Image (cartoon, grey):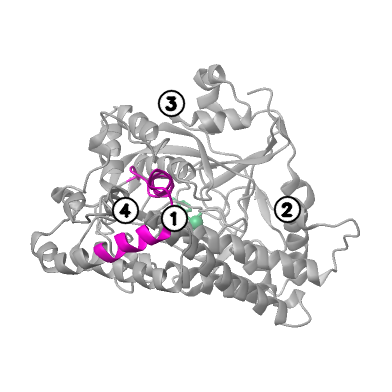
Amino acid sequence: MQNLRFDNSFVRQLPADPESGRHPRQVQGALYSRVDPTPVSAPRLVAHSREVAALLGIAEASVASPAFAQVFGGNVLLDGMQSYAANYGGHQFGHWAGQLGDGRAITLGETINAAGQRWELQLKGAGPTPYSRRADGRAVLRSSVREFLCSEAMFHLGVPTTRALSLVTTGDRVMRDMFYDGNPQAEPGAIVCRVAPSFIRFGNFELPAVRGDVALLKRLVDFTIQRDFSELLTGDYNDADEALRAEWFAQVCERTARMVAHWMRVGFVHGVMNTDNMSILGLTIDYGPYGWIDNFDFDWTPNTTDAQGRRYRFGQQPEIAYWNLTRFANALVPLFTSLEPLHAGLQRYADVYDASERNNFAAKLGLAECSDEDAESMRSLYTLLQAAEADMTLFFRALSGLDMHAPTLAPFNHVFYDEAKREQNEPGLHAWVVRYAARVRRDGLPPAERRAHMRAVNPRYVLRNYLAQQAIDRAEQGDDAGIHELLDVLRRPFDDQPGRQQFAQRRPEWARNRAGCSMLSCSS
Ligand code: AMP
Ligand code: MG
């Protein structure tokens, strides 16, 4: 670990809060506050990602050393680390929420790995910051297990995401009222070390814009382009270049479109798509009350806080991402002489989303290309899956096994949740597979190739909500093995893993309405 090199460009190049200390405050004219993690009593490493450790150049022997848990539990800073909490705002559930900031996330520094890549290391749950408002700056084990596992699961599924290096329990208890019903409980505390090239969010730009601090906004935009979008820079770079800013905005739109299209491919529902949870790099960020689709349902939201309006339901994610980009565009208005480039960027979102969705449809169905008719067919399939309460992951995995010369519903026997709904929709589904098989026969991809394509985009294993909850239940009893095994399964989500059928099953009935399995609270 001592070999980690740091180059802390964010704190070096951007203005800091002149005040020190952790007391809650409004921070004007600055993009971050310097703050150290608050020490914990007994940091213990529960799990780590060996891929992320390797990426950072941290040897497995270092991971196993007591010093590792001290650093990634927030008790010790390494030479070169300069810890801070970022200042940002955001639109929450459609409304401007003012200053938010890193209330419990603390960046330790930006490390440069052997390949020259920049990786920001950030502890989540490391104690109070000036942005904690009345909260404690901590995180509980259950939400930390979920963030740790899902970050890595998403990466292995090919979805753009922040990564997770480590999961450390603190030895301290944290009080949480999980159901917001006046019954707070003491829960084990934990800290995840998140890793990404940048944790800048739309909300980092919105806050100075709303405050009318155009100079600060411009500094952050210039910094972000130079550090995180350097591929856009040409030799004669000048920071008044509106065309460059326009292309940067369009790139953010493109990346956001690709990210959301991936979510729709794998059945991921973020649950809190507030603009403070939207990464400028188009990475999935801030794993809170997210969930995975079991029975296909565009209307499902995992977040109990969202149960009324269902703003963040599965099927609405593409529209919400667009809306969030309009908020981001709005923040950038002062940096443009006309609105035209911002409109063009938003149009790029729509175009790239459509193209990505088509690619995903083609890949999921094993077709060389997706015509208008194929897209229609996919939409009608989704309607059928929803009406029939069919499991999304199991259905698409089984689809590659359909006999294209004698299609029946036999391969799908195990995918339904409700007998009556299944029977009701069998004729529709049967007609669909017959049409689909004919379409596949016309397409002419060699069958083995088609199956391989389909199996590379339709996972066998996803982080089903109840699987995460089972691992959490065990971890809360002091047994970490469930986390390790789940992490290992999710490292190869597209491979059939013998002996691990229990990770590729329908959600059991007991989990249908259980907290943590179908309903997730924001309390974390
Ligand atoms: P989230 O919805 O998790 O993205 O959080 C929204 C805002 O609340 C962010 O500014 C977080 O830093 C802050 N926050 C959430 N939980 C805590 C906590 N336990 N302590 C301090 N701040 C928190
Ligand atoms: Mg957040």
| Residue 300, visible in the rendered structure | no
Q: CA distance from mark 3 to mark 4?
A: 40 Å
Q: Secondary structure at mark 4?
A: helix
Q: What residue does disc 1 label?
A: 363
- Which dot marks residue 16? 2
Disc number lying in front (1 or 2): 1
Amino acid under disc 1: Ala
Amino acid under disc 4: Phe
Disc number lying in front (2 or 3): 3
Give the residues in magenta.
434-463
Position in image of residue 357 (x %, y %): 47, 64
The vertical placement of 180 against 61, above or below, is: below
Residue at the image position 71 percent from the left and 64 percent from the top: 248
Residue at the image position 50 percent from the left and 28 percent from the top: 50
Position in image of residue 366 (x %, y %): 40, 54
Q: Residues within 10 Å of mark 4 (few under 14, many from 20)?
A: many
Position in image of residue 211 (x %, y %): 67, 73
Q: Nearer the viewer, residue 154 or 330?
A: 154
Q: CA distance from mark 2 to mark 4?
A: 50 Å
Q: Nearer the viewer, residue 42 or 222?
A: 222
Q: Residues within 10 Å of mark 2 (few under 14, many from 20)?
A: many
**Does the numbered disc 2 mark a residue whose Cβ is under 8 Å from ligand 1?**
no
The vertical placement of 80 against 292, above or below, is: above
Q: What residue does disc 4 label?
A: 396
Q: Is residue 438 magenta?
A: yes
Tell whether label 1 touches label 4 (CB within 8 Å).
no
